[in-house]
Image (spheres, helix red, strand yellow):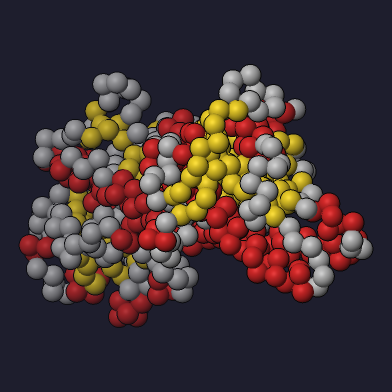
Amino acid sequence: MRFLTKMIRNPIFAAALSCLLVFLAVVGVRGAGNLEFLELPAYDWFVRMQPGSSIHDPRITVVRASEKDILSIGQWPLTDETLTQALSILLESKPRAIGLDIFRDIPVPPGTETLNTVLSENPNIIVTMKFGEGGVRPPPVLKGTDQVSFNDILVDPGGVVRRGLLFLDDGDGAAYSFALRLALLYLQTEGIVPRQDEQNPQHLRLGNVTFRPFEENDGGYVKADARGYQFLLDYQGPSSPLRSYSFSNLISGKINPRAITDKIVLIGVTAQSVKDFFYTPYSRGFSEAQQVPGVFLHGLMVSQLLRAGIEGIQPLATFTERVEILWIFLWCLLGGITGLKARSAWRFSGLGLAGILLIGLSAYLAFLNRWWIPLAPPAVAFLLTAALVTAYVTSLERKERALLMQIFSKHVSKEVAESLWQQREQFLKNGRPRSQKLVMTAFFSDLRGFTTVSEKMDPQDLMDWLNIYMERMTGIIMDHGGIIDDFAGDGIKANFGLPLPEQNESVIRRDALGAVRSALAMEKEMHPLNAHWQEKGLPEVGMRIGIYTGPAVAGALGGFQRMKYTTIGDTINIASRLESYDKDLGKEALCRILIGESTLRYLGPEFRTERIGEVSLKGKEEKITIYRVLGEDSSSLQPRPKEVIP
């Protein structure tokens, strides 16, 4: 139980425990998918923040059929004759591939026979179909050929498109996506054909780039639908990276052939009435104006595949689940360290903000280098751990400060108490003052004639009289750097050289000087006190003081409910014996001050002393050489600043 209490009061143990608990909680919450709503918008944010380019992909051209074009033609759906005319114009300019993102599962006469001929005689024309319930079949004339592709688009919760498809398995075999078919036609001319990855034959390789299939927990996703062969869309380049022309301009011959020759040309519909629109990471709202036509999305996918095959630009990669967990745990640890260093609301705010910025910057730089790493889980873990540890350390420090103030605030000067708190790390251990052996100066005082006074006063007057004496004397001791250790009736025990000792000769001398000077100041204070008491008809009293410098043990006695910081050892006993030694010695003086030879060594010539001799003190076998302090030369009695433990 005692060991457990010590561990709980250890800030490092508390930080480690907080780190572990927060880590388990964040991993659990993330595993349930409750942080995905933060992770996916972070992906969108990184997409928008990546350096853009105003240059359109020169390899792709889009022919769009807008609402205005449909009104101009005067019919929807477009007839087979109209499509044949558009395809024939494009074929005259010799494009590498044509993608028809307009369904033709059923004929739209007139011109059906001519359209079928154009489609079947030009293998560089790719048509579309759609999978699933309510799917759309390809044109019958091309069924079972390599010119058929699917144009299904994956939409995340919230309506944003962040993933593309390369293959889908319909049960009869793998079907190619619209973007992949078009990209392969273009790459074939460049001498680039799809290959199996050497390390994993199930992965597609274009040029020097391997596309690893998307898995359900990649990046910020949790248990996403990973069916088919998916890849992450990087949306690299400008938000509208494709050059486009209207369908009407194509039919009227107003498009420069150079915009078609050796290009991939996609024909699609951008009319609002067709409802082929999607949100992308560039969409900053959910109005219709923020949507992107499906044909442009397919063009973006084609562009990414071409950049991979020709330019070697890798697709976005993600950490493995194990590395992601280690990444989160790392930020839990850093949060714990931050909590240990914060110690205040202002520092926590500053360090917390710096940590979040560092996490965000790390994730953003990783994104620029083609890595999508978790952002929300480490940020949440960092902040929670830092907050918990800061709160615990702050609470612990409040208790420690209360403990220190309880022990010392009434027995030392405010400066010493504050210095003690500032240096608490070297003074406290497991929530209580650290025991230590040191060289210090012990101080004992006692009133001579107190018994006579106490017999002549009623109890309340006696306590009032004694409190006045104690208040003035303890104030003098504390002003000279002493710590009041104990009161015993009219006696005072004080320590000089605590609670943060600096064990060098100059500091030990300072403590000895402080003890002797406080004794002389107390003697001086006795004159006005006695005069005041004589006016009230009280007898005069004197004082005996014993001072000794030497090794002692300082530490806390008692439990947390009742604790006292005190000193023990031979030095303490000798000082006490010096105070009570031969009570008739120096009886004529108002204050008798006896010191040991060890204290005398630190005083210097400015003090006037007389040697009493070698004496045997009660309980001591060896004799002690003692001296009586008579005073201090007037030249050395200049005002001095209070001696404060640095």
Between residues 99 and 442, which one lies in front from this camera angle?
442
**Above or below 602: residue 258:** below
Which quarter of the figure has residue 562?
Answer: top right
Q: Residue at x 79, y 62 (%)?
A: 539
Between residues 331 and 327, which one lies in front from this camera angle?
331
Between residues 214 and 443, which one lies in front from this camera angle?
443
Q: Residue at x 24, y 72 (%)?
A: 246
Q: Residue at x 44, y 73 (%)?
A: 288
Where is the N terminus found, in terms of image quarters? Answer: top right
Which quarter of the figure has residue 143?
Answer: top left
Q: Residue 5 vs residue 213: left or right?
A: right
Percent x, y of residue 499: 55, 44
Between residues 633 and 106, which one lies in front from this camera angle?
633
**Above or below 136: residue 227:** above
Residue 567 visible (yes or no): no
**Above or below 81: residue 301:** above
Percent x, y of residue 467: 76, 62
- Identity of the residue furthest to the front in this view: 588
Residue 243 visible (yes or no): yes
Q: Residue at x 15, y 43 (%)?
A: 311
Percent x, y of residue 123: 21, 44
Percent x, y of residue 193: 19, 33
Number of residue marks? 0
- Identity of the residue furthest to the right in this view: 458
